[in-house]
Image (cartoon, helix red, strand yellow):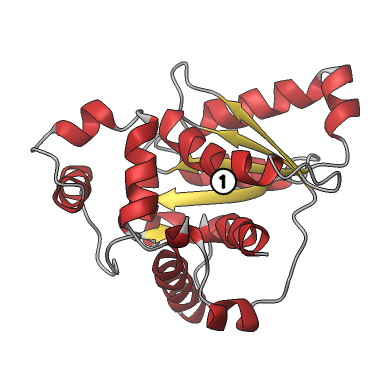
Amino acid sequence: MPRTRLSPKRLIETKKVFIGHVIVFCEGYTERNYMDYFAKIINNRNNKYTNIKIELEIAGGNAQTVLNYAEEFLLDEENNKNYSLYKKYLVFDCDDPKDIQSVITTANESNNEYELLVSNYLFETWLLMHFENISEDLSKRNTYRNLEEHLSLKKTQYSKKKNNKGIIRQIISNGNIDNAIQYAKKLDMKYIEDGKNIFVSIMKMNPYSNVYKLIEQFMIEISE
């Protein structure tokens, strides 16, 4: 699986951080399939100190329903006990609901201390970074079209196939995760230098994705 390894240079530059126990709440099947690709590789190693659990909220799914689902899930006494020591991530994009900034604020203030993995405008913004450096806002239509070109799909085919696990495997195999991480980091740094962050400025941060923060940890774990 050569395409899913960080380069030796990147490994030297990146401090080893043990993932530990992680639970990831995802907005939809595309996000879940992507996260699950790495989770299965890591969990199959049977390291007692590492475990990745994926939860999915898809019914009418958007950022708000992901947050609601996570809050309700962790209110359950058994779940709260089982996952109390897990690091908790929420993965969602910013196309819905309209008051996305309010959702981010609420999630950030939760006692569950979520780490927010946010993509603006779409999760596909992060996926497209596997193939190209994105510096300007792309519409949903153009984001899908660009992915279709990179994946050799006919027009409008990505929207029909995006929930297929094979599409995620194709993106990871044919794209470059190391480049995606670097593109996203540079974009993140640009916003920081401009005084912007997701907790107050998400509507002014397009394109954007900080999914790299968890994926880089996954890749370091896999590359060991």
Q: Quadrant of residue 169?
A: top left
Tag 1: residue type?
A: Phe
Q: Is residue 103 left or right of residue 42?
A: left
The tally of labels here is 1
**Of residues 29 and 121, which is closer to you in this image?**
29
Q: Is residue 82 left or right of residue 176?
A: right
Residue 142, image x, y percentages: 16, 49
Residue for badge 1: 38
Q: In terms of secondary structure, where does tag 1 sit?
A: helix
Does the rendering let one see residue 207? yes
Whether residue 143 is situated above or below residue 185 in the rendered picture: above
Residue 95, image x, y percentages: 36, 40
Q: Is residue 186 left or right of residue 26?
A: left
Q: Residue at x 57, y 56 (%)?
A: 199
Q: Residues within 10 Å of mark 1 (few under 14, many from 20)?
A: some
Q: Residue at x 78, y 41 (%)?
A: 46
Which residue occupies the extreme front position in the image?
A: 1
Q: Residue at x 21, y 44 (%)?
A: 144
Does the rendering let one see residue 209? no
**Of residues 185 and 72, which is closer to you in this image?**
185
Q: Quadrant of residue 9?
A: bottom right
**Of residues 87 and 171, which is closer to you in this image?**
171
Residue 167, image x, y percentages: 32, 38
Image quadrant where one finds the C terminus:
bottom right
Residue 182, image x, y percentages: 45, 73
